[in-house]
Image (spheres, rainbow, N blue to C red):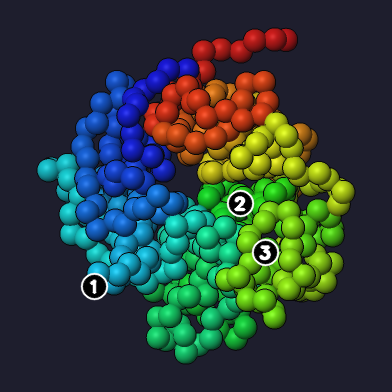
């Protein structure tokens, strides 16, 4: 492993480009960078002044490159997602948008900005924000549940199960896109073969998601990972029209270690008068059990990190003031596919998930039909960092990982650490050979 470059402003996305450079978005930059894989130098940088970034999880997020970026003059396009202020006045109306830029090969700059989809839900929490261009020439974009039902947004209703009416779509009211994965034509319109949900065809491809920060295609199938609440981070195979259960279900529909407490519906004591807790649900807050959920389109996860029994004790004295570090989760932050025929035969046809808490990639081997996970999910390429995203060089002998500039993670001996070894960096892992029999 070597540090390719450092000093990045909260890198969010890293993608191997057809120009054999690493394309990186900085959430706090807010810049799109093209970085040399040889020496880590910044070949070019493009700043997006319209980006709204606060102390939360907003800012410049996902990026996708058109496959014909350098080979076809008709499609020199770069697609990005970011949050912005939709209020022209003094207030702040945080929204998200997808924008297309044209890459000028001669000048090596991005220009001709074109908004594809605007007025999307955005928050300072759980924006998700991953963007990928599928083999069907459609954009796929993840929108989280906006952090509803927790912390400062505890009184906001969770809309991950809500589906828009035809009138809302016609009016471009995308409020109910929260907690969804979208499928979008390259001009921003609704694909004619998108699923019809509750009688309406919209950009929504799947729903019932909490915070899907990883999305990737493998052999034509779409996979996503997402953060669980206190357990049950999920790895999912995404199907059109699928309902992934949140907030009624976390992980498997097993009735274990989770109930849905709808703080926004508190009565007679209004939510605004309550003090939020991860452990104590006030009597005024209505709850529903996972086993109360009955949806014919429910899709269980391929795997969870981790399913625990109903009597599991989440309070851990080893994690004071950072309880979530000791919870049975890995905080999956991105997803990529390691194809067969690549440099490491034992990793063939595996999904790689980056972890914010563990400073590792988790390798999940797919079955031949892609419908299940084979064997144990193994952590690899460990360091003492928060991993935000990864990219794989063609051939698979080199893997790049971007790290958060700060934050908490599991310490070397357990408990909590806030000391990162390589903050705000691109780490390069190169295969040198094999050991063992």
| Secondary-structure class at tag 2 | strand
- Report helix, strand or loop for mark 3: loop
- Taking the image as shown, residue 221 lies to the left or right of residue 372, namely left
Instruction: Determine whether label 2 and label 1 are within 8 Å by CB.
Output: no
In the rendered image, residue 200, in percent from the top left (x then y), is placed at 55, 84
Quadrant of the image containing the C terminus: top right
Q: Disc 1 designates what residue?
A: 89
| Closest to the observer, 346 or 243 | 243
- Tell whether 258 sits left or right of 73: right
- Spatial separation of the CA atoms under disc 2 and disc 3: 11 Å
The residue that label 2 is drawn on is 226
Compared to 358, does 121 lie above or below? below
Q: Earlier in the sequence, mark 2 or mark 1?
A: 1
Towards the viewer: 276 or 306: 276
**Alpha carbon separation for disc pair 1 and 3:** 35 Å
- Report x, y in % for residue 324: 64, 43
Q: What secondary structure is found at the residue carrying circle 1? A: loop
Q: First in sequence, mark 2 or 3: give its number.
A: 2
Q: Position of residue 208 (x, y in %)?
A: 64, 66
Residue 123 falls in image quadrant = bottom left
**Residue 122 x, y percent position in the rendering:** 43, 64
Question: Quarter-wise, where is residue 105 in the image?
Answer: top left
């Amino acid at each position: 492993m070597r540090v390719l470059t450092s000093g990045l402003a909260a890198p969010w996305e890293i993608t191997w480009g057809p120009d054999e450079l690493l394309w990186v978005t900085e959430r706090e930059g807010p810049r799109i960078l093209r970085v040399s894989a040889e020496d880590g130098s910044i070949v070019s940088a493009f700043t997006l002044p319209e980006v709204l970034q606060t102390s939360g999880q907003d800012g410049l997020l996902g990026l996708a490159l058109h496959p014909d970026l350098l080979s076809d003059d008709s499609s020199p396009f770069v697609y990005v997602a970011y949050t912005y202020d939709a209020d022209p006045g003094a207030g702040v109306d945080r929204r998200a948008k997808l924008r297309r830029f044209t890459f000028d090969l001669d000048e090596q700059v991005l220009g001709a900005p074109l908004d594809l989809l605007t007025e999307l839900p955005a928050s300072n929490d759980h924006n998700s924000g991953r963007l990928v261009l599928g083999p069907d020439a459609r954009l796929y974009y993840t929108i989280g549940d906006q952090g509803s039902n927790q912390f400062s947004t505890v009184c906001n209703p969770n809309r991950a199960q809500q589906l828009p009416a035809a009138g809302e779509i016609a009016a471009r009211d995308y409020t109910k896109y929260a907690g969804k994965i979208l499928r979008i034509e390259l001009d921003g319109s609704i694909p004619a073969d998108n699923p019809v949900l509750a009688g309406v065809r919209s950009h929504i491809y799947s729903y019932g998601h909490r915070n899907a920060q990883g999305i990737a295609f493998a052999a034509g199938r779409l996979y996503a990972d997402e953060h669980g609440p206190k357990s049950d981070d999920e790895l999912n195979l995404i199907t059109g029209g699928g309902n992934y259960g949140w907030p009624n279900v976390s992980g498997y529909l097993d009735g274990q270690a989770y109930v849905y407490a709808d703080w926004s519906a508190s009565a007679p004591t209004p939510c605004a008068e309550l003090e939020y807790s991860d452990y104590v649900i006030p009597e005024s807050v209505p709850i529903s059990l996972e086993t109360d959920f009955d949806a014919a389109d429910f899709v269980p996860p391929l795997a969870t990190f981790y399913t625990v029994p109903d009597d599991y004790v989440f309070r851990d004295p080893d994690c004071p003031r950072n309880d979530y570090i000791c919870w049975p989760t890995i905080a999956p932050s991105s997803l990529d596919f390691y194809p067969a025929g690549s440099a490491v035969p034992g990793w063939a046809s595996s999904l790689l998930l980056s972890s914010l808490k563990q400073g590792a990639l988790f390798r999940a081997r797919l079955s031949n039909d892609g419908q299940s996970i084979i064997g144990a999910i193994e952590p690899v390429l460990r360091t003492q960092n928060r991993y935000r995203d990864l990219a794989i060089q063609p051939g698979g002998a080199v893997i790049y990982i971007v790290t958060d500039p700060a934050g908490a993670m599991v310490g070397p001996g357990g408990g909590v650490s806030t000391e990162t070894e390589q903050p705000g960096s691109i780490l390069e892992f190169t295969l040198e050979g094999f050991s063992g029999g």
